[in-house]
Image (cartoon, rainbow, N blue to C red):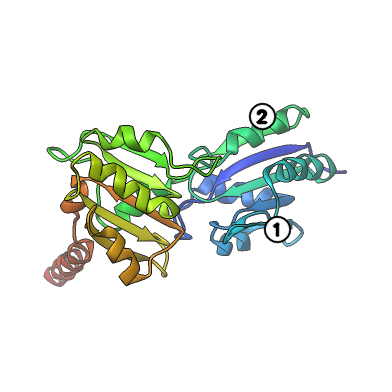
Amino acid sequence: MKSTAKLTVVGAGPGDVELITLKALKAIASADVILYDALVNESLLEHASSKAELIFVGKRKGCYAYHQDQINELIVDRALRYGHVVRLKGGDPFVFGRGAEEIEYARDYAIEVAVVPGISSSIAVPAYQGIPVTKRHASESFWVITGTTRSHDISGDIALAAKSTATVVILMGMGKLSEIVQVFSKEGKSETAVAIIQDGTTPKEKVGIGTISTIEAIVEKKQLSSPAIIVIGEVVNQRVDLSGLYAKADFASLKTRSETY
């Protein structure tokens, strides 16, 4: 007999396989069916039951395995037929992840629902590069904005954010980079610092650092592309060299241990 029909929407984190919560791993392990996206580290699927059905429902290079209405129908079908469905999404499922939409759809069919938050790439990816999204005397707030709307236009919120002194983190914005540069340039911010981080927190990570006026040339030189995060603001200039800190920490640890003998 199948278990109670249930949907758990789970955040898989930004890419590094270890940046996932214990609660998320438990959900994956208990799933009868897992529907996973393109930005999910597939190593996480090793935690699934050998009996679980694994279905890729992501988008790669503009090609959809399933459209959203089809994913919604899959969730309901599999939950009613098999029991526990885990919808595994990159980052946090409630940050441009459409997790709320899927939960609402499932509830219409009296399916039990739950959500497991994930570490958002909007914060974690800059952090891995030593970039704080806020810092005293540099930024008192930050915007997280989708670069491309459902109608494939640049988000109007980017123009609003460009008028502020806040850090601006843009997801899904590489296709609109030229327009983003124009928006910030019109606000007199051609020398504002910019970081573009591709495949953040993964072994394939690539980074370009520049200003609004130079970032397009840097992207071309370094061949940066999606999936990438754009970080704009003074905090990019406040970037911490984490490799140096790790080296010092290791040295201090060795010194401490040597003094105990």
Find residue 205 and report its horizontal and vertical position in percent: 38, 66
The secondary element bearing badge 2 is classed as helix
Q: Is residue 257 above or below residue 54?
A: below
Kind of residue sitting beneath label 1: Ser
**In the foreground, 156 or 255:** 156
What amino acid type is highlighted by mark number 2?
A: Glu
Q: Nearer the viewer, residue 198 or 84?
A: 198
Mark 2 vs mark 1, CA separation in Å: 27 Å
Residue found 14% across the figure and 72% down from its top: 258
Query: Does dot 1 land on a helix, a strand or a loop?
Result: loop
Q: Looking at the image, which residue is at 30% across and 52% down? A: 127
User: What number is the disc on residue 227?
Assistant: none
Q: Where is residue 125, by image quadrant? A: bottom left
The quadrant holding residue 222 is: bottom left
Which quarter of the figure is the C terminus placed in? bottom left
- Residue 18 placed where, x, y %? 45, 58
Q: Are marks 2 and 1 in contact (CB under 8 Å)?
A: no
Between 69 and 37, the one lying in front of the other is: 69
Q: Which mark is residue 104?
A: 2
Q: Quadrant of the N terminus?
A: top right
Q: Which numbered disc, 2 or 1, marks the residue closer to the eye? A: 2
Q: Which residue is the site of mark 1?
A: 49
